[in-house]
Image (spheres, rainbow, N blue to C red):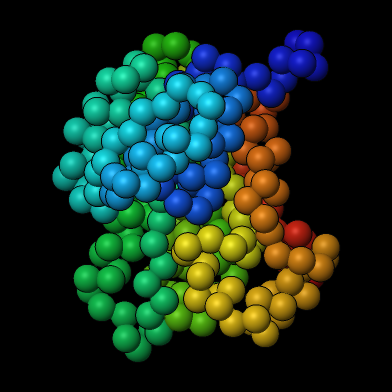
Amino acid sequence: MQPANLFNVSGKVVCVTGASSGLGRAAACLLANAGAQVVGIARRTAQLEAWQKETDGTTAAVSADLSDRSAIAEIAKEAAQPFGPPDILINAAGINTREHADQVTAQGWEQTMNLNLAAPFFLAQSMVASMKTKGWGRIINFASLQSRRAFPSGIAYGASKGAVEQMTRAMAEAWSPNGITANALAPGFFRTELTGPVFADPVLAKQNADKTCIGRNGEPNDLNGPLMFFCSPASDYVTGQVLFVDGGFTAK
């Protein structure tokens, strides 16, 4: 394959959850501007419309609550309407309730597991049939530093993200024989709506930056290369892997 085609996603149909904000929005913009046809899924309609206005590509929006497990199959059908069944699924939607272990509620636990873990699986399950027919597909999940590290008030979030790492390997075992790769990105500390409480404390933000090998926290553009790698033919022989994009946080 020519080098120019290694990272080509032009014409691919991409579904991105959490496209209304944060790293999901950044991913949806990146893929749309790279020539993919992108369907963004999120709860907030106004933010989805704002995302669409920011891109130069072909996009569609689906306003839906992915934490409602019973609605996943219908959401998948709706996501396939604008451009056809997705070739690439990026599971970026997530929630962190930041409850101490002593204060975790059943409601908070269920919401976390439904959005962070169940939605990525059942959405992928709803989309793999068409990927199998094509003999090609990409599933990119979002893991976390908390897939392997424990942080204060992060037991529900960490449990869900630890499970995402294992789920990614299991997806690869189940579906890669059909040409569908499954991998995960595990970002370090990036300034997003989800990490707002962390960056609101300058001392804590600096402490996190100092724990990396590079010496700074992440910026959304730092995920562009790894994401394009997992979405494109460049990663044809890579599956079941978790790539930590954390400036070396987990190396120290």
Horizontal arrangement in the rendering, residue 86 relative to residue 31 (left or right): left
Viewer-nearest residue: 153 or 217: 217
Horizontal arrangement in the rendering, residue 179 relative to residue 42 (left or right): right
Q: Identify the residue at horizontal 67%, vertical 28% (top origin).
A: 235
Query: Residue 20 appears at what percent x and percent y?
Result: 41, 47
Q: Is residue 138 visible?
A: no
Residue 122, above or below 94: above
* Quadrant in which the N terminus appears: top right
Q: Identify the residue at horizontal 36%, vertical 28% (top origin).
A: 60
Query: Residue 207 appears at what percent x and percent y?
Result: 71, 80
Query: Residue 150 appears at what percent x and percent y?
Result: 55, 75
Residue 234, above or below 226: above
Horizontal arrangement in the rendering, residue 5 relative to residue 113 (left or right): right
Query: Residue 227 appears at what percent x and percent y?
Result: 62, 38
* Quadrant in which the C terminus appears: bottom right
Residue 130, above or below 59: above
Q: Identify the residue at horizontal 50%, vertical 76% (top origin).
A: 197
Q: Is residue 132 visible?
A: yes
* Residue reaching furthest to the bottom: 102
Q: Identify the residue at horizontal 50%, vertical 37% (top origin).
A: 54
* Residue reaching furthest to the left: 70
- Tally of marks: 0
Residue 126, above or below 242: above
Viewer-nearest residue: 133 or 3: 3
